[in-house]
Amino acid sequence: FIAEEVAQGGGIYVHCGAGVGRAATMAAAYLVSTGLTPDQAWARIREVRPFIRPKPVQIAQIERFAENLRV
């Protein structure tokens, strides 16, 4: 649904309870799906939300997601 909205020129707002982990992970997954590496995705998110604090398990999930996209 994010890709569809962006393709139509729309904007997306992703948020969770604190806005530092879960929302950032969802945004990272989208960015990885567009071709960014996980490191590039996290860096892009930190440009606009420097206080994100994804947990190690969330970082690992994005790494696995990126690997699955490459298969």
Image (tube, grey):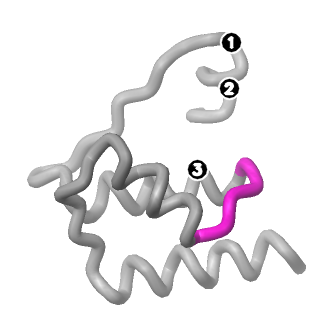
The residue type indicated by label 2 comes to Glu
Disc nearest the viewer among 2 and 3? 3
The residue type indicated by label 3 comes to Tyr
Q: Please indicate whether residue 49 sits to the left or right of residue 29 in the image.
A: left
Q: Which contiguous range is marked in magenta?
A: 34-38
As measured in the structure, the alpha-carbon distance from the residue carrying label 3 to the one carrying label 1 is 16 Å
Q: Quadrant of residue 65?
A: bottom right
Quickly name the residue at label 3.
Answer: 30
* Along the line of sight, the residue nearer the viewer: 22 or 50: 50
Q: Please indicate whether residue 68 sits to the left or right of residue 65 in the image.
A: right
Q: Please indicate whether residue 48 sits to the left or right of residue 41 in the image.
A: left
As measured in the structure, the alpha-carbon distance from the residue carrying label 2 to the one carrying label 3 is 11 Å
Dot 2 or dot 3: first in sequence order is 2
SS at circle 1:
loop
Expressed as whole percent of the image width and height from the top left, the position of residue 27 reads 46, 50
In the rendered image, the vertical position of residue 54 relative to residue 31, given as above or below: below
In the drawing, what numbered circle is on residue 8? 1
- Neighbourhood count class around disc 1 (C-alpha, 10 Å): few under 14, some 14–19, many 20 upward: few
Quickly name the residue at label 2.
Answer: 4
Dot 3 or dot 1: first in sequence order is 1
Residue shown at the point (54%, 59%) measured from the top left: 41
